Image: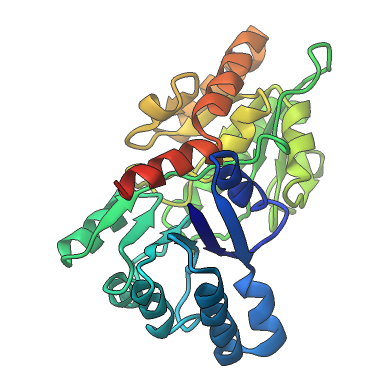
């Protein structure tokens, strides 16, 4: 099968065409983000359509998460050649912007990493499916068995109260810094001044965060939103690197991540983190890493997409 991938193409997304290729498919990537910057929207879309007509794919797996990137002309061109089209969003826009509903009329499947948005598209009469994030196991993996690991880390930006869980994020970072002292580090933007300087690790960009996770014994996760099915792909990256992960609970976490410690409150998170550090248990992190590699690479997501086409 020929698979066309109009996606922002960077070091973290190289695994997506590789996953399709590993399943025996011929792939072609169109980095619309780079072309948009280089030639503008209208010319980018013309090139996009020309690429589709030249390649004649059977499947287009697209990632458009903002308005005014494409017009209906692009998905119409896919439909004209009989190409099955999917538009996937790996993030949350709250509330769901109206343009998603407009675009859903032109794609065969609109897909999200959270269930409320799936239900919203279905309620409008269009096909929508849940597709969790995947990750790159060439970038995120366990360290050597004898590698030293210590402390707990939280990687995430502080956007104050802009997002639903922003206030709780601040509370948990301050509570962890107070409870764990030098055993805790926070990485991301806008944390300086909110916790002691010894707890601020600074900014870290992907995939450099792999080194932070591989050096830590425990990783903390607390999402901006409480939504069924939704977790940042940081959860995959942390588990893949063998951390014991303490994570804010979402509907479905027990099935997706049976070795992750799910909590409901900041107080529970601090208690669970302290206990995980005291237990000095590498086996849980190793089991979590094996499970993540088995169930959450992009190859498993490709299998799911293939089933949509049957």
| Residue 179 in view, yes or no | no
Identify whether 296 is placed above or below 261.
Answer: below
Q: Where is residue 89 in the image (x, y as percent from the top left)?
A: 45, 59
Q: Residue at x 50, y 28 (%)?
A: 269
Identify whether 43 is placed above or below 280.
Answer: below
Q: Between 183 and 118, which is closer to the camera in this rendering?
A: 118
Task: Using residue 180 as the reference point, say whether residue 23 is left or right of it.
Answer: left
Identify whether 286 is placed above or below 30.
Answer: above
Q: Between 166 and 220, which is closer to the camera in this rendering?
A: 220
Q: Position of residue 210 (x, y in %)?
A: 74, 37
Q: Position of residue 288 (x, y in %)?
A: 56, 20
Identify whether 87 is placed above or below 112.
Answer: below
**Picture quadrant where residue 275 is located:** top right
Q: Which residue is drawn at 49% across and 60% down?
A: 161
Q: Between 248 and 235, which is closer to the camera in this rendering?
A: 235
Tally of numbered tags: 0
Q: Residue at x 40, y 34 (%)?
A: 249
Task: Using residue 4 as the reference point, say whether residue 132 is left or right of it.
Answer: left
Q: Between 271 and 34, which is closer to the camera in this rendering?
A: 34
| Residue 106 in view, yes or no | yes
Q: Position of residue 110 (x, y in %)?
A: 34, 61
Q: Which colour scheme is used?
A: rainbow
């Amino acid at each position: 099968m020929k698979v066309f991938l109009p996606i922002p193409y960077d070091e973290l997304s190289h695994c997506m065409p590789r996953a399709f290729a590993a399943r025996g498919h011929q792939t072609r990537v169109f980095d619309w983000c780079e072309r948009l910057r280089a030639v503008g929207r209208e010319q980018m879309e013309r090139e996009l359509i020309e690429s589709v007509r030249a390649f004649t794919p059977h499947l287009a797996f697209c990632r458009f998460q903002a308005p005014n990137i494409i017009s209906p002309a692009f998905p119409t061109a896919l439909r004209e050649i009989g190409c099955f089209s999917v538009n996937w969003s790996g993030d949350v826009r709250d509330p769901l912007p109206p343009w998603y509903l407009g675009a859903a009329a032109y794609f065969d499947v609109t897909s999200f990493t959270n269930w409320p948005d799936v239900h919203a598209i279905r309620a409008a009469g269009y096909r929508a499916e849940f597709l969790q994030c995947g990750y790159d196991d060439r970038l995120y993996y366990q360290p050597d068995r004898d590698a030293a690991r210590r402390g707990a880390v939280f990687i995430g930006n502080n956007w104050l109260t802009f997002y639903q869980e922003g206030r709780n994020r601040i509370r948990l970072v301050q509570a962890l810094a107070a409870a764990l002292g030098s055993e805790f580090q926070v990485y991301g933007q806008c944390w300086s001044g909110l916790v002691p300087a010894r707890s601020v690790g600074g900014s870290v960009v992907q995939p450099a965060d792999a080194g932070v996770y591989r050096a830590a014994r425990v990783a903390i996760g607390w999402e901006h939103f409480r939504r069924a099915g939704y977790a940042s792909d940081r959860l995959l990256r942390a588990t893949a690197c063998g951390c014991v992960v303490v994570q804010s609970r979402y509907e479905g976490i027990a099935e997706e991540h049976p070795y992750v410690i799910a909590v409901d409150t900041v107080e529970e998170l601090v208690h669970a983190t302290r206990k995980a550090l005291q237990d000095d248990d590498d086996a849980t992190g190793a089991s979590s890493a094996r499970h993540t590699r088995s169930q959450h690479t992009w190859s498993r997501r490709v299998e799911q997409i293939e089933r949509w086409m049957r």
